Image: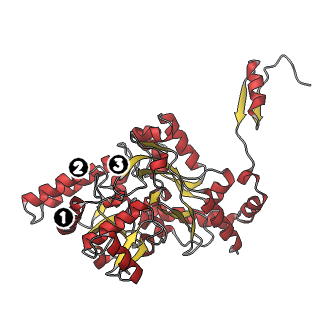
């Protein structure tokens, strides 16, 4: 029999109305948020049960172990057409899954057009459409050639690209250099100044940094910089200011060792100083070689790729061989917009840069960047809670990225599609927002959420093909 003189302690699971009533009587209550797994969907609950067991857990442990072992090194710079295996002289690469020019969002169309103008292939969109229709020019997604690009993500053969090698697994990835702000291809807009800048990047910036890297004794350790940067206010996706400064510290003495004249060195240094996003494209290549090295483990349910083109969202899972799962991309309804703009003005979530979240950076470690806490509520408590939420859907943590701003909490790493389905929590992706119409560019920043539909497709595939 209960002693009614003892203090009553209650843990309530489910409806909060019971908690509210007890609190009104000054009874201490702990409220436990609970919901049935997979939202109560019996079909998905069954699939989760069939994908449980030690063989899946071991596969996931191995996948994440490969991520943690990876060591991305920036080793070279060259023209895309010379170094990206499989890139053809008429290729125009773009972010996200395969898409026709007519189906592309306007900003990505504009970026493709600007790239074709830069190459000297066309003078306007009408000529571009004609050459694409005839097959004289060919569109292809970056990810089929192990390359990556932020936002519109366009790469053409004459562009200078970063080459990053995974020292632990020897695989490689490529990306252009970040153009900065203003009229820039990656934000879906261009003018004459854009084309001139791209030419300078191809003929001055790229060759200059290539020469500097020859004096680096094996290249520049990108995760080393990212580890420092996450202690200095970067989460490495929406904010790269610290990492860009740390990179310049390493590059400047290397540039001084080259035969470049002072004017050229000054131009390169000033370009990097003027662009807080300069390191972003290096981060993309680092995360790409890491995720690619982890891909291909049989029975793995860990996400090894996420990519968007403003229309569609693509997801890759470690144990699903070369298959990508595609659904509509997310609307930018959790972004913070510049004055005069709103959701109605925004293109859909876009860019290959969601690869960053697959290896424990960006939204996974959003608490590293106090200046963007407004993305998830406005306080560091909100940022820490967001990281804890992401941890609930991940296999492990990455101690390389453990920012002091959130009490050195290690970054969650290894998004598990089973945990996403079970909890109903999808990954958050830190990102910019671009206007849906050509010629305007960035209009805000915030978070996007990976659509649940791709995780359901991936889960169903893994269940069907499990052994």
State how far apart marks 2 and 1 are (Cα): 15 Å
Q: Residue at x 54, y 73 (%)?
A: 296
Q: Residue at x 60, y 49 (%)?
A: 392
Of residues 186 and 6, the one nearer the viewer is 186
Place of residue 369 in the rendered image (x, y in percent of width and height, measured from the top left) = 41, 42
Disc 1 vs disc 3: which is toward the camera?
A: 1
Q: Is residue 158 left or right of residue 308?
A: left
Q: Which residue is mark 3?
A: 228
Q: Residue furthest top?
A: 5
State how far apart marks 2 and 3 are (Cα): 21 Å
Evaluate whether residue 71 shows in this view: no
Considering the image in quadrants, where does the N terminus appear? top right
Q: Residue furthest front?
A: 126
Answer few, some or many: residues within 10 Å of disc 3's Cα (few below 14, many 20 plus, some between 14 and 19).
some
Answer few, some or many: residues within 10 Å of disc 1's Cα (few below 14, many 20 plus, some between 14 and 19).
some
The first of marks 1 and 3 along the sequence is 1
Q: Secondary structure at mark 1?
A: helix
Disc 2 vs disc 1: which is toward the camera?
A: 1
Vertical relation: 47 (above or below) 87: above
Disc 2 vs disc 3: which is toward the camera?
A: 2
Place of residue 229 in the rendered image (x, y in percent of width and height, measured from the top left) = 35, 48
Q: Which residue is mark 1?
A: 200
Task: Give yes or no for contact between labels 1 and 3 (Cβ–Cβ under 8 Å).
Answer: no
Considering the image in quadrants, where does the C terminus appear? bottom right
């Amino acid at each position: 029999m209960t002693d009614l003189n003892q203090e009553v302690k209650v843990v309530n699971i489910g409806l909060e109305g019971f908690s509210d009533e007890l609190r009104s009587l000054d009874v201490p209550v702990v409220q436990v948020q609970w919901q049935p797994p997979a939202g109560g969907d019996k079909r998905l609950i069954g699939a989760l049960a069939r994908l449980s067991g030690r063989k899946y857990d071991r596969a996931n442990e191995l996948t994440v172990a490969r991520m943690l072992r990876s060591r991305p090194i920036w080793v070279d710079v060259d023209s895309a057409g010379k170094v990206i295996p499989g890139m053809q002289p008429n290729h125009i690469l773009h972010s996200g899954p395969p898409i026709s020019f007519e189906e592309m969002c306007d900003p990505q169309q504009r970026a493709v057009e600007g790239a074709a103008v830069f190459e000297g292939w066309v003078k306007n969109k009408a000529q571009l459409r004609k050459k694409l229709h005839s097959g004289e020019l060919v569109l292809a997604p970056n990810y089929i050639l192990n390359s990556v690009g932020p936002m519109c993500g366009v790469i053409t053969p004459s562009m200078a690209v970063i080459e990053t090698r995974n020292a632990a697994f020897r695989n490689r990835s490529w990306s252009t250099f970040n153009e900065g702000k203003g009229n820039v291809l990656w934000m879906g807009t261009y003018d004459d100044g854009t084309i001139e800048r791209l030419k300078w990047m191809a003929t001055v910036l790229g060759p200059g940094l290539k020469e500097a890297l020859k004096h680096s004794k094996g290249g520049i350790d990108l995760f080393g910089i990212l580890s420092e940067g996450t202690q200095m206010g970067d989460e490495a996706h929406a904010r790269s200011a610290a990492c860009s400064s740390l990179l310049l510290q390493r590059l400047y003495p290397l540039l001084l060792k080259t035969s470049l004249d002072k004017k050229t060195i000054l131009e390169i240094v000033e370009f990097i100083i003027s662009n807080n996003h300069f390191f972003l494209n290096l981060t993309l290549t680092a995360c790409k070689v890491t995720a690619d090295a982890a891909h291909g483990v049989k029975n793995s349910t860990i996400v090894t790729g996420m990519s968007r083109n403003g229309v569609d969202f693509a997801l890759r899972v470690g144990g699903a061989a070369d298959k990508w799962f595609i659904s509509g991309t997310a609307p930018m309804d959790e972004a913070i917009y510049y004055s005069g703009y709103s959701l109605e003005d925004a293109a859909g979530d876009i860019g290959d840069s969601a690869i960053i979240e697959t290896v424990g950076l960006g939204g996974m470690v959003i608490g590293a960047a106090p200046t963007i806490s407004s993305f998830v509520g406005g306080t560091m408590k909100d940022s820490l809670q967001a990281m804890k939420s992401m941890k609930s859907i991940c296999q492990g943590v990455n101690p390389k990225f453990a920012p002091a701003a959130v009490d050195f909490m290690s970054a969650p790493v290894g998004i598990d599609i089973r945990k996403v389905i079970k909890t109903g929590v999808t990954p958050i992706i830190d990102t910019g927002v671009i206007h849906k119409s050509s010629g305007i560019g960035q209009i805000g920043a915030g978070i996007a959420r990976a659509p649940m539909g791709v995780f359901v497709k991936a889960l169903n595939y893994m269940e069907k093909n499990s052994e």
